[in-house]
Amino acid sequence: MHELLAISVTLPILLSVVSFGWSRVFGDPDLFPGSGRLHVLLILLQVLSVTMVYCYPSRLSFLGISLLYFVQGLGVAYFIRKKGRVDCGCLGPQINSKLGFPLIVLNLLMGLMGLLYSHPVWFVHSHSFTITGLMLEGMLLLVTLLIIVGVPDALYAIRVYREVAAPHVSKIKRL
């Protein structure tokens, strides 16, 4: 039960971490509206909070990730006020993701979900280190890599194939 709760709370953060890592490996431009140091600090906090949720499933880890979501929501509101609806760089350079009120609402809802999961009466936490949680986090990082990189590349390949095949549709239909 804990694993499904952890996945539902951490998936957006895992997508952000994987897209940051992918763009760093290939030297893509950083579209984060703040400074580069602030972006690296945010990613490190995201990695730490996600690792806490998976490796040490406790009330404290869910409170930490909900606090991170609330801070991210405040950061989005700050950058909207300061710079407007610019590209946030949340999902890397391949996916266009603008700062906006839906992103604030998403961060607030995920923060509330983390608070809900930290309630000790509703969910029992193990309060012990688990190596299987670390392996689950690694597998989810691979799945999010597929989502962040594989899906946009597949959609691009399909679009290019259709453009190339468009002049030959009549020949293909006759066969």
Image (cartoon, rainbow, N blue to C red):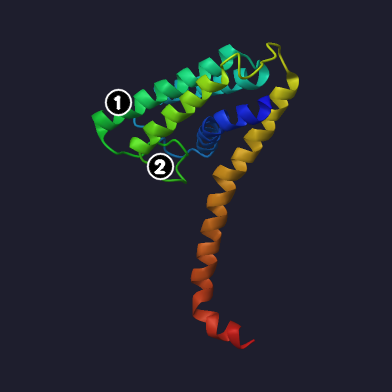
Using the rendered view, name the quadrant where residue 168 is placed. bottom right
Residue farthest along the bottom direction in this orientation: 174
Quadrant in the picture for the N terminus: top right
Lower position in the chain sequence, tag 1 or tag 2: 1
Name the amino acid type tagged 1: Tyr
Residue at 66%, 15% in the rendered image: 56
Dot 2 falls on a residue whose secondary structure is loop
> Do the CB atoms of the residues marked 1 and 2 lie less than 8 Å apart?
no
Q: In the image, is 138 to the left or to the right of 103? A: right
Q: Which residue is under mark 2?
A: 97
Q: Classify 10 Å Cα crowding around label 2: few (below 14), some (14-19), many (20 and above).
A: some
- Residue corresponding to mark 1: 78
Q: Residue at x 31, y 38 (%)?
A: 86
- Looking at the rendered structure, the number of numbered marks drawn on it comes to 2
Q: Amino acid at mark 2?
A: Ser
- Quarter of the figure with the C terminus: bottom right
Rendered image quadrant of residue 157: bottom right
Q: Is residue 107 visible?
A: yes
Residue 3 image offset from top left, x and y in percent: 67, 28
Residue nearest the viewer, comparing 99 with 168: 99
Q: Secondary structure at mark 1?
A: helix
